[in-house]
Every structure is written in C-alpha cells, then in structure tokens.
Amino acid sequence: MNQSNHYPADFTWGVATSAFQIEGGASADGKGPSIWDTFCLNPNNIKDKSDGTVACDHYNRYREDVSLISSLNVDAYRFSMAWARVQPSGKGAWNEAGFGFYDRLLDQLAAKDIKAHLTLYHWDLPQGLQDDGGWLNRDSAHRFADYAHEVARRFGNRVAAIATHNEPWCSANLGYGNAQFAPGVADAKQAIQVSHHLLLSHGLAMTSMRATASSAQLGIVLNQWTADPATDSEADRAMAELEYARSVQWFMDPIFKGRYPELALRAHGQNAPVVHDGDFTAIAQPIDFLGVNYYFRSFCSAETPPRTPPGKLGFTDMGWEIYPQGLTELLVKLHAEYMLPPIYITENGMANPDAVSGGKVADPERIAYVQMHLDALKAAMEQGVDVRGYFLWSLLDNFEWNSGYAKRFGIVHVDYETQERTLKDSAIWYRDFLSAQRQR
C-alpha cells in the first residue's frame, strides 16, 4: 500500500455482516420466518442446496464473534437486524426475546468500545408481510416505518448509525426482476414498482426515526458502480449512460433531487412505477450519511455476444472484475452530481476460494484487493470527497445468498461443520494496518 495513505485520526474503520447470513437461530425464541427462510425451502434456489438455518451460529456465538471483532483493532461493526426476529410477522406484537438478543449484542460491543452501525433491512422481509404482497404492497412501506420507529426508540441512543436499507437495487432487481433472490419473482414491472416502495419506505422511516430524537446518524446504503462503455461506439456509450441512470441515479435522484432520472423513466415506459402525490417529499428527507457499497464496475457492450471486461487485475471468485479505480471514479462523479452528506464505504471486499492449511489461511489476493481499493478511496478523498469510514466485507465467511456456502468473503474462515473460526492472513494484515494507522 502507498505509505502516504494516512487517514484522518477520526476515520472509522470497521467490518460488516448481515443477519440472515450469519445468525442462524432461524426459529429461536419466537423468531418468525423471513422470505429467505421460505426461498431456501426450494433447494433449487440455492446453488449448493443449503439454507440459513444455522449459518455461522452467531445467534449463540455472538460473544465470541465480538471478541474476534475487538481483536482486529476496528472501532466499528456494521450489522443488520432480522426484522422477523423482533416482529415475527412484520406487524403487530413485538418479540421481546428477539430484541433481547440485540440488546445483549450491543452490550458486548459497548464493553469492547466498538461503535454499532445498525442496518434495519438486509433483504430478509418477514414472510407474514410477503403473504400480504411483500414490497409490491405499498402498505409494507408503512409497516417498515413502524419497525424503524420502534428500533430507534429502543436503541437509537446506543448505536452510532442506523441505515434504513442495504442495497435496495438488489431487493428490487434480484428479488423481483430475475428471481435470483427471495422472494423469487421475475417481472420487470413489479421490480420497478418495488424499487419505488423501498425508497418510499426509506423516506417514511427517516421521518419516523427522527420523531424519536435519537442520537444515531441516519441514512441509507446503496450498491453503486460506474458504467463504462466497452468501446467508443455510440451504442456502447448509450448503453452505459442508460445503465448508470437505471441503477445509480434511479436511487440517488429521488433521495437528493426529489425525482426519477428522465432517461430511465423513458426507458421503463409502461413499467414506470405508480407514484403518489407527496412520495418524493417523503423520499427526499435529509440524511446524515450515505453508505456506498462498491465491488465492481458495469462494463457495457451492445455487441452480440457482448465484449467481456478486460480484467487486467483479475476476477474474484464471484466472477467480478477487480477494478479499484472505479471506486475513485464513482465517488468523484457522485460528488460532482449531488449535494452529498458524509459518505461511508459500507461494503468492499472479495470472495476467494480460501482453505485452512496448517492452521492458517493464506489469502494474498484479498490483501491486495483491499490495499488497492483503499488507495482508490484515498485518491477520491484527495479530490474533495468527504469519506468518513470504511467497512470491510465481510467479518466472517457466511451464507452467500443464492451461492450458499460455496463463496467465502470473510477475513475470518468459518468451518461450517465445527463452527471454528480461523483468522485469515487478511484479518491479520487488516489488524496490523489499523494498528499502524493509530500510531501515526
């Protein structure tokens, strides 16, 4: 790494996880089923035919895991709450035993002086709400606002930040657009309407959380990328412009400009969402921070078959091109286009086919990946982008959605048979890097 990469003394360094991917305890202590519990019941939906019933057993091993987090010298931990754990059907009675788990987790984090960054929704809608239409039902946005209010009321003075959604692009496009994720719907018109209801739920939740007067910083987490034309052809350039409008601007413009991007609306045509009066006023609530998840760029080719990304730095185990300069380009572009609040890089990392050998896990590819992306992040900061923190994805190897347990993003290896945790070389590198940052 470029040794001139000295970050501000108050820069936040963390690791990240999500509830369904690590918790297990699928029906423990009154937890209701989520759409991912249901989705996994069909083994054809998951590449290795696994499920999240046990996952990393974090529900029972959270003390051990918080100790692991503390050993890494990070000062923050980003995690999500399982909505169905605290409100089993997504409406009605709260489950005190479920809230008790997060209460104990927050106690452990506070004891280790680790700041809690809580995400309310990381794709695991209570099945009870899905039975009523899920995110296609506008009422779900109001149920989400009720949930957000209760969480902020209980925990809003014990967490540093609360994000409403993690990657609503995925919830809409992978959950409703191509059936890759729960609830497994493939309908373009539904996906676009769902994206609007997710944004509406964010705005309503911001208002409901503000009403609690909690001290937490409030925002949203979006997965974003640059869209690069494969060639300088007019077709490729037009394809890249539309891709950026349909992905990044589709979620950014309503929040920061109170409207959808015209280019994307024209392309959606009859599939454009139904928007009620006042929706954009609700969505465009001021936010305290923007979370950006970055993994790859979009490489846009109108040719048949399409050109593939050059991958000069290789590809991850997910098949994603390693393209760190895209992080710089994305952040600088956002900075120029929007009046932004402080940014946190809330996810960045890579899947790698890791294995334990001699009690160790060598993953030099991941170390190089993180180093390059931190260099790219610093380059954006030096161009005026206000970035306040970085969360490495992920703390643990975990249930990687429709890939099951076959893809390992963690800096800590998990043996799913024994639940043994082993620090990978990347975890040791990250620990030492953070120690050196603090000594400057």
Image: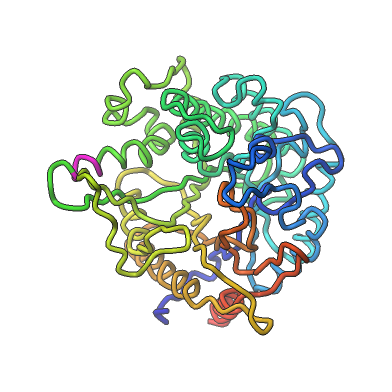
Residue 328 in the image, given as x and y percentages of width and height = 34, 60
Residue 31 in the image, given as x and y percentages of width and height = 80, 38
Residue 238 in the image, given as x and y percentages of width and height = 19, 40
Quarter of the figure with the N terminus: bottom left
Residue visible at 46% across and 35% down?
178
Residue 72 in the image, given as x and y percentages of width and height = 65, 73
- In front of the other: 46 or 386: 46
Q: Is residue 174 magenta?
A: no
Q: Magenta segment, principal secondary structure?
A: helix
372 with respect to 157 (left or right): left
Coloration of the structure image: rainbow
Residue visible at 59% across and 53% down?
400
**Marker count (numbered):** 0
Up the image or down, 356 lies above or below 204; here it is below
232 with respect to 155 (left or right): left
- Extreme residue in the bottom direction: 358
Highlighted magenta segment, given as a residue range:
236-240
Residue visible at 31% across and 21% down?
269
392 with respect to 412 (left or right): left
Residue visible at 71% across and 42% down?
82
Up the image or down, 239 lies above or below 393; here it is above
Up the image or down, 194 lies above or below 15; here it is above
- Extreme residue in the top direction: 277
